[in-house]
Structures are given as structure tokens and as C-alpha cells.
Image (cartoon, rainbow, N blue to C red):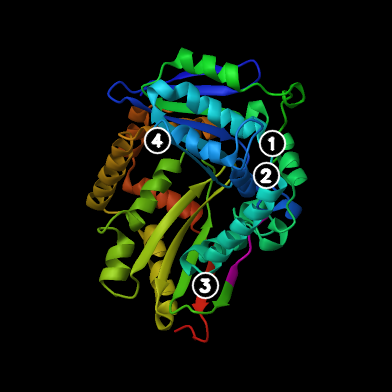
Amino acid sequence: MSYKKTILNNGITILSEHVEHVRSISIGVWINAGSRDEAVHNRGIAHFLEHMLFKGTESRSKTDIANFLESLGGSVNAFTSKEYTCIYARCLEEYLEQGIDLISDLLLHSTFPDDELQKEKEVVIDEINDIQDTPGDLIFDYFYENLFPDNSLGYPIVGYKEEVTHFEKSTCISFISEHYRPDRFIISVSGYIDHQKLVRFVEKYFNFERQTLAASKRILSAPTSIKKYKNVYTKNANHQSHVCIGTRTFPYTDKDRYILLTLNAILSGGMSSRLFQNIREKHGISYDIGSFADFFHDTGCIGVYAATNPKNSRKSIELIRKEIQAFLDKPAKELELERTKALLKSSILIGLESTSARMNRLAKQYIYNNEICPIDWVIAQIEKITPEDIQRVSQRIFEKEKFVTTILKASGKELG
């Protein structure tokens, strides 16, 4: 994988990867600002702002925005995470300029009309309600709140109704002024792309006002020391208990990152994984069970989620803890590790068949590493992992007193 990079005088970083065998492009404009950059008074503003960018600019109505790329056979959308926001588009390579034009217009010239702002508050509150009615989603918000208490990493990305209700145009403008500065922008494009043409279009359309050109130092508050939590929340109209058990790990740039990803795949990477075989297949107490690993600038986490009959909640927790303890007690079996590494490598390589996945990889690698690691290097890191590496990293991160257990139990049901 080869890529090209240009940093403009205003601080914008442009990354591109030419893929010869396709005729489309995936464009992503990434901003180093997410829910982690929020304060208590504006929790949810990064996500709300992402919605409002599509509600009208100085030259386009929201209908114009919706029609512009779609009329050319393309599409545009966005998402917000804890540490970044991305506006992205897919289109044929001949419409590169139109894609850059549209995204720049959304990011630099949105007007945040009052009537649209009031309507979108209702839409986001409806989104929050939808999560509240979906225990499999809600449990993760509670889990992160418990894992990162009193810290913006623990805020739900969608925010809270009490804050969203009071958002105004000034709230949006204030967040943009503070965080949407050119040195925080990374423009990543993958597909049948000409890098120099891309640079020309970015220079043409991403014209920031002079007062936004100054670099702004991003300050991320470090999570406080963790305590042991066990929180049980009761929700109505829920026939299952939902359990999330996890602990903090280490940042995206840590040398053990690929070992942890491999450990996570041993836990729940496919039907042959430990959680699937030992909890779903052997004991039959959970249809939906799996593990996850997240990495941030200065920390990370790993966890296991399970949905089960309330009478089996305690048993599911015991079995999950047993699987975690197994990593501490002895190294993984060689055959199991080789199978998992093959699964992980194929997942990475198959993902490269998508220009969207390539665009995402370019941006995220640069956001966290400030460089792009070659695929061959990544595969080599996975191939050299040993059973002893898995055990060593397990012993590094799995400390019993630092696990957070969060349970969302069925209303009126006792935990069995």
C-alpha cells in the first residue's frame, strides 16, 4: 500500500491512495474533535453538530445538499466518535471536485437555521430515546460511564436530553470555533485518485477565515484512577439481562496493540472462538455474546458483552471471568493462535478490497500514529505473535480489582 501526503500552508493534511482497478473514490474529511472534547454543559454537541451541518449552508438548502451528489450517483454522510468526526462521500472519480466542494461547504459555511435547529433537537432526542429502548445499545453507554467516571470519555456520543434540549446556534458556532481549525483537519481519499488534482481542489474550496488559521492545542483530560464498580440498572419491557465486563488497557500507539487485538479475536473472533464455543455452544446460556477492544490517544479498553436470561446472569459472569482467567493461567494453544491469526490477517486483507475501508485506515493511522504503517508490516506484527505474548499482555491488563461489571437487568427480575 503506497500513499501520498501533502500538508497545506493552513495546516490541513491531505492523504491519498491510488487504487488502479476501481473507478470510484471514497472521500473522508476527518476532524480531530469528538465527544471527548465536550464539557458537562454541552455533552452531545459534537454529534448534534454533525447533524446540523446538513441543514443548510450560505448557498445550499438542506434539499440542495441531499440532492447534489445523489444526482451524480454519489452519496454523502457523516459519523461522530469519541475522538473524531468524519464527513464522507462516495462517488465516481470524475466527480471529485463536486465531492470536495460539497463537504467543504458543509464544514465551512453551514448557517444553522433556527427552525432546523429546533427540529433536529427533537430528532436527536428521539435517537437518545431509541437507545434507551434498546438494552443492547444502552448497556455500552452505561459501561463507558462506569469505566471512565467523571471524564468525557465516559460521555455517550449522542449526549443527554437535558443538555441537547438547550443547544442553540451559538453552541454550535462556539464548538466549531474552538475545534474545527485547519490543523485539526485530515482529508483522506482512496480509489482512482490523482493526488495533485485532489490538492488543487482542497486548496480551492477549504478557504478558512483568517481568525481560524491559528493552531489550537488539543487538551484531553486524562481519566481518573479506576475503582471497582458493579452497577445494576432496571429497565422496563426487557426480558433479558445484559452484562458488560471490562477493564482499561492502553493507547492506540502501544507496542502491544496487535497482541491485544489477537487476544480479543481468540475470545470472540468467529464461531470457533472461546466465548462462542464455551458459553453459547457448551452451556447454551447466551445467544448474543462477544468481546470488543477500543483504543484512544492515551488509554483503551477491552470488554465482553452478553445477553442472557436473568436466571443465568450470575452464571454468565462466572463463565466470562473463567475465560479471562484462562489467559492468565497458561499460554494459548499454538493451533488456536495460528487459526486466530489467519482469521485476523484475512479480515484485514479482505477489508482492503473496499475503498471506504482504505480511506478509513489512512485517516485513523495518521490521526493516532502520525504516519501510515504498511500492510506488510502490520501482517508481520501479527505473524510473529507467540502464545507467550498473549499470556504476557493478559497479565499486563487483567487485574481483578480493575474490572468494571455493568448489568442491565429485566424489570422485576432477580439475577440468577
Label 2 sits on what residue type?
Asp
**In the rendered image, which residue does mark 3 sit on?**
407
Magenta-tinted stretch: 220-230
Between discs 1 and 3, the one toward the N terminus: 1
Label 3 sits on what residue type?
Ile
Between discs 4 and 2, the one toward the N terminus: 2
Whether residue 231 is visible to the viewer of this picture, yes or no, is yes
What residue is drawn where x is 39% and y is 36%? 357
Give coordinates of residue 315: x percent, y percent: 40, 78
Between discs 3 and 4, the one toward the N terminus: 4
Task: Count residues near mark 4 (Cα–Cα under 10 Å), then give few for <14, some for 14-19, many for 20+.
Answer: many
Cα gap from disc 4 to disc 2, whole angstroms? 26 Å
Discs 2, 1 touching: Cβ within 8 Å = yes
**In the rendered image, which residue does mark 4 sit on?**
356
Give coordinates of residue 111: x percent, y percent: 69, 38
Describe the element under mark 4 as helix, strand or loop. helix
Viewer-nearest of discs 1 and 3: 1
Viewer-nearest of discs 3 and 4: 4
Discs 3, 4 touching: Cβ within 8 Å = no
Cα gap from disc 3 to disc 4, whole angstroms? 35 Å
Q: Which mark is residue 179?
A: 1
What residue is drawn where x is 26% and y is 70%? 281
**In the rendered image, which residue does mark 2 sit on?**
37
Quick check: 17 above or below 289? above
Task: Count residues near mark 1 (Cα–Cα under 10 Å), then give few for <14, some for 14-19, many for 20+.
Answer: many
Between discs 2 and 1, the one toward the N terminus: 2
Q: With 99 as the anchor, is 154 left or right in this view?
A: right
Cα gap from disc 2 to disc 3, whole angstroms? 28 Å
Give coordinates of residue 122: x percent, y percent: 63, 59
Q: Nearer the viewer, residue 129 or 19?
A: 129
